Image: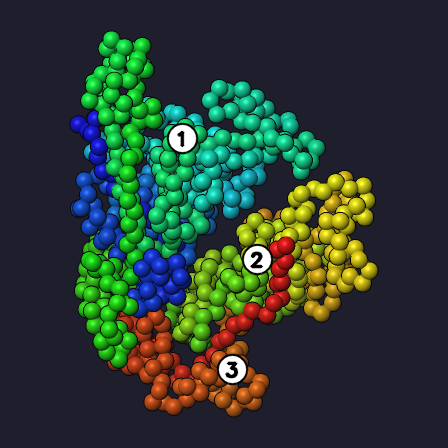
């Protein structure tokens, strides 16, 4: 019996694994390095390593649960091969206690998710804020039969209520009725409030397993604003005694729209989130309407970390008795001797058990995953000419022999099957990148080197040949890292099976498109949510904020006081004020050039895009409603790989005018033009051509013929360089 005792609960966590089943290479960012993931300890990730750590930590604690916050699908070639089967089978093999549905679980459709869940999961799959169509109907998805709103876990006497909250923000289609997924989303806080009230009498702790995202997770206990049309009946929310909604002043609201405050949910103990690939170390502490502290934890992404959250849980007595106006038993450490009039008053812990302390640990998943204590490669003197400390090499070799054999036996079959499938020839090398080609411009927030390369590759592809191209930034899922660029690299960049779509847009529709890009980017810190080719524009996030202020006006002249420079004589930009429905407005997408000419509202433009946003993905409704769409069937991967082969080789660069070629590419060629120096060319991660020649599988993993061919003739391969050229400028003031 644990009643009246303080016990420990250990929560092991992953989120957003994104099919990183096998170890892979990347360039650790500053956050990764700060959390103990180093360049010298690549490759990273791998579910066998995570399984071994879960197994180890389970042995070390009395009460342990392992929970995943969704998006275990999509992101590596194995998903394109197995459609999620190996990911779900692994979770069942490791005996996961619960998982919330992530948005990428739907990437091959609701029926694929339903099929994989029916066949392979032995754990609860959760989402309380999704209402599914009746799955017993022949025309409906079967997914509703596999997804539950909550589960109750009895962890050696400690009862946990686990409530799932699925993503809504990036699943635009489910907000529209009759969607193909058969899902209707419901308001998160009110849904959660109902389930917390339902479960609280029978559980000790309430845990929210979420894929909503960080800000949405924070709003669960703290509350949020909501806009609703006046015809919606919310009186039952406004009139309730505990935590009622409140109507707010709303000068920006259009006629028939009312703004309300939806209060936070009381009674949550822990929120375990995902979706935005964030690590919260230490966890955040939020305050709910009852004044209680709520722990919020996110464990990072891409199988780079396993986290461990230890909770000290004070469990109340099972029996509450009012004896002569005082609650018994007297030794109840929550509130001994509490005054009472009846036994009901003696429910000393109205929210069940209470968390009185917590501790958070993170385990980096790399070649040193099993090290205890963990080695810092920068804390040792370099031991040999490989650039590694001997201590690190020794520990990495030791960890390589460790592992979780059930996971290894399960996953190895999928790896071999994928290698034997001719559609997944992942070892073919297309070129070499001397420096990283990043998918995001973290400094300027506009166009990125890989975004520019991708959009141009799509635009000029044969059978496309458009005037302009746009693709969503988040559709490009990884960087091109320094080293050899092979097909596996391309799959990591484009894990989705996206194809190129061609359509014709009027100039006015193009203006709407650029306005939407700016407005969407404004909500993401003015980081551009699109990458383009064939034009330039200014993304004025400051103007989005002005538009949202709904400054009152009777004419456009009244608006000049809010941004006077665009009203002054001689102003050369495209921005201008309008007075629309009594409020000031100006297009936030400004100074748009298509080719070298200003956007003509009366012209027609042939544009290329990807099939996802062409069909309205990520909210691109201006593309969705277009009736001229033609899906070419050309894969974005194919367009990019063909474009990469156009880059010059070292033979070309060394014969060209040095002033007419890229300095970084030329420097690489000059460094390695002597055959004796080529052993030092980095191939991938910490593997060099010297390691390939020596068949050093500890450094290189499997050594294949394309690697040997490249190292034998590196000057014959295209040298790939990306650049950010300011085609997307931004204003934030």
* Callout 3: SS: helix
In which quadrant will I find the N terminus?
top left
Q: How far apart are marks 1 and 3 (CA)?
A: 60 Å
Callout 2 secondary element: loop
Task: Residue at 23% x, 60% y: name it.
Answer: 374
Q: In this view, does 548 lie to the left or right of 25?
A: right
Image point (42%, 32%), residue name: 288
Q: Disc 1 on helix, strand or loop?
A: loop
Disc nearest the viewer among 1 and 2 = 1
**Nearer the observer, 385 or 491:** 385
Is residue 103 placed above or below 452 in the rendered structure?
Answer: above
Q: Nearer the viewer, residue 76 or 187?
A: 187
Q: Which colour style is shown?
A: rainbow
Identify the residue under disc 2. 528
Relative height, residue 677 to residue 295 (above, below): below
Q: Position of residue 595 (x, y in %)?
A: 69, 68
Q: Residue at x 39, y 66 (%)?
A: 27
**Label 3 near label 1: C-beta < 8 Å?**
no
Q: Which of marks 2 and 3 is nearer the N terminus?
A: 2
In this view, the residue in front, 400 or 271, is 271
Residue 291 is marked as: 1
- Residue 663's label in the rendered image is 3
């Amino acid at each position: 019996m644990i009643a009246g005792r303080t016990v420990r609960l250990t929560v092991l966590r992953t989120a957003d694994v994104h099919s990183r089943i096998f170890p892979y290479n990347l360039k650790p960012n500053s956050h990764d390095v700060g959390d103990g993931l180093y360049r010298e300890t690549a490759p990273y990730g791998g579910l066998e390593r995570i399984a071994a750590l879960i197994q180890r930590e389970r042995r070390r604690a009395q009460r342990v649960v392992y929970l995943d916050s969704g998006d275990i699908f999509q992101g590596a070639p194995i998903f394109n091969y197995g459609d999620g089967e190996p990911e779900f089978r692994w979770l069942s093999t490791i005996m996961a206690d619960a998982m919330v549905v992530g948005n990428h679980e739907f990437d091959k459709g609701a029926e694929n998710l339903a099929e994989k869940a029916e066949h392979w999961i032995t754990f609860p799959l959760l989402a309380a804020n999704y209402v599914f169509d009746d799955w017993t109907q022949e025309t409906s998805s079967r997914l509703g039969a596999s997804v539950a709103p909550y589960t109750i876990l009895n962890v050696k006497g400690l009862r946990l209520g686990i409530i799932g909250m699925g993503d809504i923000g990036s699943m635009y289609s489910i907000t529209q009725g009759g969607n193909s997924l058969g899902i209707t989303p419901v308001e998160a806080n009110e849904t959660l409030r109902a389930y917390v009230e339902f479960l609280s009498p029978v559980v000790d702790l309430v845990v929210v397993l979420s894929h909503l995202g960080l800000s949405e997770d924070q709003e669960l206990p703290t509350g949020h604003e909501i806009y609703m049309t006046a015809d919606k009946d919310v009186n039952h929310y406004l009139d309730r005694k505990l935590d009622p909604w409140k109507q707010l002043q709303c000068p920006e609201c259009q006629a028939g729209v009312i703004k309300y405050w939806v209060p936070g949910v009381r009674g949550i103990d822990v929120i375990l989130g995902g979706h935005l690939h964030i690590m919260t170390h230490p966890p955040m502490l939020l305050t709910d309407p009852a004044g209680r502290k709520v722990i919020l934890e996110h464990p990072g992404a891409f199988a780079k970390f396993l986290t461990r959250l230890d909770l000290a849980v004070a469990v109340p007595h099972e029996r509450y008795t009012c004896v002569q106006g005082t609650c018994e038993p007297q030794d109840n450490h929550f509130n001994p001797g509490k005054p009472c009039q009846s036994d009901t008053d003696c429910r000393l812990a109205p929210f069940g058990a209470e968390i009185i302390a917590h501790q958070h640990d993170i385990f980096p998943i790399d070649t040193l995953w099993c090290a205890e204590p963990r080695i810092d490669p920068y804390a040792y003197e370099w031991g040999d000419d490989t650039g590694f400390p001997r201590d690190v090499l020794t520990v990495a070799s030791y960890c390589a022999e460790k592992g979780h054999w059930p996971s290894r036996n399960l996953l190895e079959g999928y790896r071999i099957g994928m290698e034997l499938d001719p559609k997944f020839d992942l070892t073919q090398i297309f070129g070499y990148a001397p420096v990283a080609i990043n998918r995001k411009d973290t400094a300027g927030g506009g166009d990125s080197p890989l975004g520019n390369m991708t959009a141009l590759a799509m635009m000029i592809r044969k059978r496309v040949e458009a005037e302009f191209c746009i693709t969503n930034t988040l559709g490009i899922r990884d960087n091109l890292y320094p080293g050899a660029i092979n097909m596996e690299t391309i799959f990591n960049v484009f894990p989705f099976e996206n194809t190129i779509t061609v359509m014709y847009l009027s100039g006015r529709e193009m203006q709407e498109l650029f306005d939407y890009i700016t407005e969407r980017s404004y909500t993401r810190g003015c980081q551009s949510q699109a990458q383009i080719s064939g034009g330039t524009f200014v993304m004025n996030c400051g103007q989005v904020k002005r538009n949202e202020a709904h400054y009152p006006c009777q004419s456009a002249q009244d608006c000049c006081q809010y941004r006077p420079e665009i009203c002054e004589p001689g102003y050369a930009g495209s921005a201008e004020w309008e007075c629309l429905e009594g409020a000031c407005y100006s297009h936030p997408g400004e100074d748009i050039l298509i080719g070298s000419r200003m956007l003509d509202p009366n012209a027609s433009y042939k544009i290329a895009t990807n099939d996802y946003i062409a069909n309205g993905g990520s909210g691109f409704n201006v593309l969705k409603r277009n009736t001229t769409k033609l899906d070419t069937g050309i894969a974005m991967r194919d367009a990019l790989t063909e474009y990469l082969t156009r880059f010059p080789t070292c033979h070309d660069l060394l014969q060209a005018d040095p002033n007419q070629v890229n300095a970084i590419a030329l420097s690489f060629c000059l460094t390695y033009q002597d055959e004796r120096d080529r052993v030092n060319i980095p191939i991938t991660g910490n593997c060099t051509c010297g390691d390939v020649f020596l068949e050093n599988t500890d450094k290189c993993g499997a050594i294949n013929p394309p690697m040997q061919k490249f190292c034998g003739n590196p000057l014959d391969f295209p040298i790939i360089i990306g650049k950010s050229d300011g085609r997307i400028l931004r204003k934030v003031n």
